[in-house]
Every structure is written in C-alpha cells, then in structure tokens.
Image (cartoon, grey):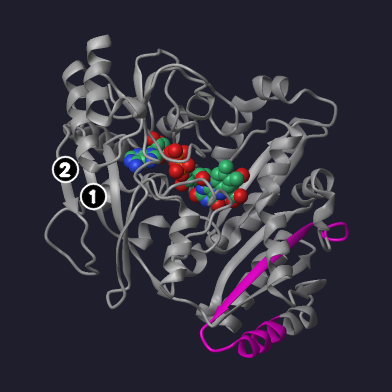
C-alpha cells in the first residue's frame, strides 16, 4: 500500500497528503453521529490532479469519499471505519475562474466556500442567492452534490436551479468539461442534473458555472407571531399575493425550537416566542427602493393583523436588526446541538398539506412517547420542515435515539407519504437514509438509479454505500 500512497503523493505533492496526526475534522461528521478512518486525506489543487488520483484509485480499486466543508447532516462526507478509503478534500480548489457580467454567470472551483462565492459575486455587483446557515464552511461542490436548499429557495430555487454548467471528473478519471453558461441547451441527456444531487457517488465536481442576479435595491426582514401552523400557511399565501416575486424568505420556527435558542443563546433576545406557538421570519428583496419595500411590508403586516392571521410583528429598522433576526433562525441548529442529539428530519410536503401533516404527526408522536419535544422549524416558503424529535426532559439523548430512532423515523416517514411528501428535502440521503430510501422511494426509480450507478461507476469506487447500495 505504501507504493500506492507514494504514487498519490507524487500526484499532489507530499504536503497535500496526510495519513497521521489529528484528522478529526475530516473523519468525524458535523453532528458527531459517526467517526470513520481514512487511509489518507488528500487535497488536490487542480482538476488534472483529481483526474490522476481517480485513475490511480481505480487501478487499485480503492474507494474515494469526496469532501467539501464536511457539514453534511446525513453522514455523507466522512470515510467509513475500514481505514481503506481515500478522503478527497476539495478545499484547496477554491478559485473564482471567471465572472461574465453580461451573461450573469460566474465560474468557480468546487472547493470554494459558499460565503466567499457570495462575497465575490457582490464585489462584482451581483447576487449569488444560495444561503445556508453553514455558508461560512460549506463549499459549492458540497452544495451542488447535495442540491442544497436553504433560505432563499422560495424566490431563487435550490442549488440545482442556480447551476448552469459543471466540470466533473468521472469515476474512471476522465474530465468532462461542461462549464457552459447556456440557459438553453437541448443536446441530449442532462448530465449536469445527473451529477447535481448525486452526493459524490457518480464522480467529483471540480468546478461549476453559477447563475448571478442583480443585487436587490433593498432587503427587509420581519418577524411575526402566529397562533397555529394553519395561520403560518395563511400568512404565506398573503405574502405571495402582496409581495409577489419580492418575497425572498419565509421561515417558520416552532415555540420549542425558539425556546432552545433562548436557553442556549440568551443574548439573542428572541422576539414574540413566549406568546406564540410559531414565529415566522419573512424577507422581501425589492428591486425599487427601501421605502417601496417598507410600504409593501407594512401593508402586508397591517392586513395580516386585521385578518387575525398574525398576533404581532416587528419589521427590522436596520441591517443590524435584520441580521440579528436571521441569526436567531440560523442558530436553531446550534441550539439543538447544544441540547444534545435528536432525531433529525428534513422533509418536504406540499404547503397545503403542512397543517394536516403537523396535526396528525404531532398527535401520533406525543401519544407514543410521553413528554417528547418536537423541534419543528424550516423553510415553510418551499414546503420544507425540519421536523425533529427531542428526548423528554431528563432522558439521556443517546439512549432516546437508540430506543426510538427507528420507530420515530417510520412514523414520521409514513406520515410524510400519507401527505404526498419526500423524506429528504435538501440534506440528501448520505448514509443515514439509505435504508429508509429503500422503503419510501418508488422501486422503479430506485432500479433506474442503480442502473445509472452501475453504468457510471461499475467498480463502485465513488462514495460507496451512500444514497443507494449499488451491489
Ligand atoms: P460535505 O458535507 O463535505 O459533503 C456533502 C456531500 O457532498 C457528501 O456526499 C460528499 O461526498 C459530497 N461532495 C462534497 N463535495 C463534493 C464534490 N466536489 N464533488 C462530488 N461530491 C462532493 N443544507 C441545506 O440544504 N439547507 C440548509 O439550510 C442547511 N443549513 C445548514 C446549517 C448548518 C449549521 C449545518 C452544519 C448544515 C446545514 N446544511 C444545510 C447541510 C450542509 O451544509 C449542506 O448539505 C451543504 O450543501 C454541504 O456542503 P459541504 O461542502 O459541507 O459538503
Ligand atoms: C436549517 O434549515 O437550519 C438546516 O437545514 C440545518 C438543520 O436542519 O438543522
Ligand atoms: Zn434547512
């Protein structure tokens, strides 16, 4: 094996291959649900190096786990514990290759951190709208490989919708240059959309051409309290009607989720949570002016109060206030992590079916486990809930997970199916949901997926065991 590692070392240079020392940041998943052991952590600097690495690994039938920021929520980006896999860290490949202002596109390498891509776009006078709580560390390659969603999907779509072209190293080490900035191209199968969302199981994304948008003239943020999930959905309807395409964010946060932020980050001063079962964070991105946006927003809040849809609302008066409100929303994940392990879900349901889904599923779970706490929050604007289940007070979260995770997943996923939803909205499948996918995905779709995997990665060297069991 030393000979093999020497070969890889000559490809990337000896300083970019690690086999010893503390490799925790590569080998442990963000939620601390699993820890693996890599044969080596390798950090290529160019697409050619990635291609040579894949060819060398294929020759020896050594499997590869691509990794960006290692912020996966579904244990998708760490090696297994065999000590035989190569962890391919893409973080050194982080250059902006080009910005085409007239075409409204930018081409970046896949290890570029999302926040840096947003900043580079802004420096050039544009908006790259993908926004996630993990944007300080997740990468464009990871975002595209998981087809990430986040908080702006209601207006701009998910990562897939923001990508026009890809450069990919295939599972046999060939380089596909598909970095097209075209918005129309009907020349056969859509390879880009095959790799987007494939979670590193078909090849390695090395660069992407992304869509840019004009920077909005103004962004406004508001926070409203509602008495029920039905009213949250009613407010969404009103917001669509009164803000039209200006509606760029619509997040729902349940009372228990906000109580965790209040408990673990008391400095954040969460508004309205004590007196409302749900709070809503709304954002409008206006192409005219701040006063135009404010007039629209105030009109919406006025109407919603008159109609009894919301109990109260605050509209941020400054950028700092808006940021503080967003920080509360983004820190629900950190507050949950501080509280201990929980049974995490990332489901999508047609917006119209969210109230009956929540009523039905809340009742089943609370009947099953006395004192259980539901951490319900998410991207209501696009029908995506993080419907998480936390242990009753005083119960060890680890024991709670061991005892209930399987049954609670089955209960929630059965309910998701009943209301026409999906068991993974934006986080992907990773390792955590491979078995569930077998039960909840259409068998014909699974069989087609398996055929694609076998055709594109016949030796199963690309992130094996994730998304589907190929063999
Ligand atoms: P990684 O975690 O490193 O990898 C994810 C998957 O992509 C793995 O299967 C990996 O093998 C594969 N992969 C990575 N890079 C490549 C590549 N270049 N080529 C091929 N395969 C690759 N997700 C959302 O969708 N919406 C959210 O709002 C959101 N918020 C989050 C908030 C927090 C605090 C955290 C910790 C996570 C959040 N996530 C969210 C989940 C996560 O950040 C996303 O899934 C993100 O897209 C992963 O990017 P990454 O670079 O960290 O990828
Ligand atoms: C979010 O919406 O905050 C993310 O998807 C992370 C999470 O689900 O905890
Ligand atoms: Zn989310």
- Residue at mark 1: 167
Q: Residue at x 35, y 48 (%)?
A: 110
Specify whether residue 59 is painted magenta: no
Is residue 432 shown left or right of residue 195?
Answer: right
**Spatial CA span between label 2 and label 1:** 7 Å
User: Considering depth in this image, is 36 or 304 the residue closer to the camera?
Assistant: 36
Percent of width and height locating residue 396: 77, 23
Quarter of image, res 414:
top right
Image quadrant in which the C terminus is located:
top left
Mark 2 in CB contact with mark 1 (< 8 angstroms)? yes
Q: State the residue lying farthest toward the right.
A: 275
Task: Give the image location of residue 54, x and y in percent.
Answer: 22, 29
**Is residue 402 rendered to the left or right of residue 426?**
right
**Magenta-tinted stretch:** 273-300
Helix, strand or loop status at disc 2: strand
Quick one: quadrant of the N terminus? top left
Tag 2 residue: 175
Residue 150, position in %: x, y?
53, 56
- Secondary-structure class at tag 1: strand
* Residue 1, visible in the rendered structure: no
Report the residue at 37% width, 44% height from top. 145
Among numbered discs 2 and 1, the one appearing first in the sequence? 1
């Amino acid at each position: 094996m030393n000979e093999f590692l020497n070969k890889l070392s000559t490809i990337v240079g000896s300083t970019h291959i690690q086999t010893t020392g503390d490799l925790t940041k590569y080998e442990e998943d963000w939620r601390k649900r699993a820890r693996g052991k890599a044969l080596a952590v390798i950090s290529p600097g160019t697409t050619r190096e990635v291609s040579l690495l894949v060819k060398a690994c294929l020759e020896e039938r050594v499997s590869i786990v691509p990794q960006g920021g290692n912020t996966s929520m579904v244990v998708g980006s760490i090696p297994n514990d065999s000590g035989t896999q190569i962890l391919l860290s893409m973080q050194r490949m982080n250059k902006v290759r080009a910005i085409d202002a007239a075409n409204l596109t930018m081409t970046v390498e896949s290890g570029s951190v999302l926040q840096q891509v947003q900043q580079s776009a802004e420096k050039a006078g544009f908006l790259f709208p993908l926004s996630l709580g993990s944007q300080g560390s997740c990468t464009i390659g990871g975002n595209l490989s998981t087809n990430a969603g986040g908080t702006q999907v209601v207006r701009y779509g998910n990562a897939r919708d923001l990508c026009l072209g890809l450069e990919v190293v295939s599972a046999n080490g060939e380089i596909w240059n598909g970095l097209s900035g075209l918005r129309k191209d009907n020349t056969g199968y859509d390879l880009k959309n095959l790799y987007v969302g494939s979670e590193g199981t078909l090849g390695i994304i090395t660069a992407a051409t992304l869509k840019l948008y004009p920077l909005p003239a103004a962004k406004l943020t508001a926070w409203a309290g509602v008495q029920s999930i039905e009213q949250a959905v009613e407010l969404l309807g009103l917001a669509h009607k009164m803000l039209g395409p200006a509606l760029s964010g619509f997040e729902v946060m349940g009372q228990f989720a906000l109580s965790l932020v209040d408990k673990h980050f008391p400095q954040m001063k969460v508004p309205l949570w004590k007196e409302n079962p749900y709070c809503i964070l709304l954002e409008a991105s206006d192409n005219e002016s701040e006063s135009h946006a404010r007039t629209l927003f105030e009109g919406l809040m006025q109407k919603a109060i008159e109609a009894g849809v919301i109990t109260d609302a605050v509209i941020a008066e400054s950028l700092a206030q808006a940021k503080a409100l967003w920080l509360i929303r983004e820190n629900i994940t950190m507050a949950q992590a501080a509280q201990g392990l929980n049974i995490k879900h990332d489901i999508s349901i047609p917006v119209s079916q969210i109230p009956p889904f929540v009523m039905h599923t809340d009742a089943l779970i609370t009947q099953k486990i006395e004192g259980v706490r539901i951490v319900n929050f998410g991207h209501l604007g696009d029908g995506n809930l993080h419907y998480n289940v936390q242990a009753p007070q005083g119960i060890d979260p680890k024991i709670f997970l061991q005892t209930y995770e399987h049954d609670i997943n089955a209960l929630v996923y059965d309910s998701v199916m009943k209301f026409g939803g999906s068991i993974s909205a934006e986080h992907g499948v990773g390792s955590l949901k491979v078995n569930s996918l077998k039960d909840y995905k259409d068998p014909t779709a699974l069989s087609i997926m398996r055929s694609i995997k076998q055709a594109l990665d016949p030796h199963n060297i690309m992130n094996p065991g994730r998304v589907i069991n190929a063999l």
